[in-house]
Image (cartoon, rainbow, N blue to C red):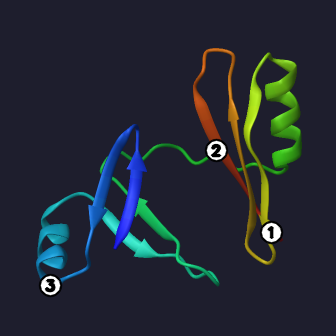
């Protein structure tokens, strides 16, 4: 079972043929990410702009300088990416991924 939290809403799905049919009628696309752990990428109808991050450490420093905080310390997955989550001064949480090169 896959559990996904999007904007405060919880979604769960159990892969099945019915799910496959429903997915083909929706604007959502769920695909398994090629990684040494279970991770899924979810594409939704409204595609936002992907901003590449060259350093999650630099991003964390900018949030701290602006009165924000780091809510999830840097998590590095060797050969894949590094992830960090920060909260701005207004309380909004953002996560950033730095791809491993």
Q: Which residue is mark 1?
A: 100
Characterize the local packing of mark 2: few (<14), some (14-19) or many (20 or more) Cα atoms within 10 angstroms: some
On the image, the x and y values in percent for residue 21 come to 12, 76
Q: Which mark is residue 6?
A: none
Q: Which residue is mark 3?
A: 17
Identify the residue at image location x=17%, y=74%: 19
On the image, the x and y values in percent for residue 68 come to 75, 22
Tell me the distance, in whole angstroms, between the alpha carbons under discs 1 and 3: 35 Å
Q: Quadrant of residue 46?
A: top left
On the image, the x and y values in percent for residue 101 come to 83, 71
Tell me the distance, in whole angstroms, between the alpha carbons under discs 2 and 1: 16 Å
Above/below status of 51 relative to 29: above
Secondary structure state at the residue bearing disc 1? loop
Q: Which mark is residue 95?
A: 2
CB-based contact (under 8 Å), mark 2 and mark 1: no
Mark closest to the chain's N terminus, 1 or 3: 3
Characterize the local packing of mark 1: few (<14), some (14-19) or many (20 or more) Cα atoms within 10 angstroms: few
Above/below status of 24 relative to 62: below
Q: Quadrant of residue 86?
A: top right
Identify the residue at image location x=76%, y=28%: 69
CB-based contact (under 8 Å), mark 1 and mark 3: no
Q: Which quadrant is the N terminus positioned in?
A: bottom left
């Amino acid at each position: 079972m896959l559990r996904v939290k999007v904007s405060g809403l919880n979604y769960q799905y159990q892969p099945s043929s019915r799910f496959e049919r429903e997915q083909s009628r929706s604007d959502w696309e769920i695909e398994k990410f090629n990684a040494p752990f279970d991770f899924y990428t979810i594409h939704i109808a409204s595609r936002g702009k992907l901003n590449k991050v060259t350093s999650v450490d630099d991003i964390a420093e900018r949030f701290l300088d602006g009165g924000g905080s780091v809510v999830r310390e840097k998590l590095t997955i060797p050969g894949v990416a590094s992830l960090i989550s920060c909260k701005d001064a207004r309380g909004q949480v953002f996560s950033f991924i730095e791809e491993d090169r």
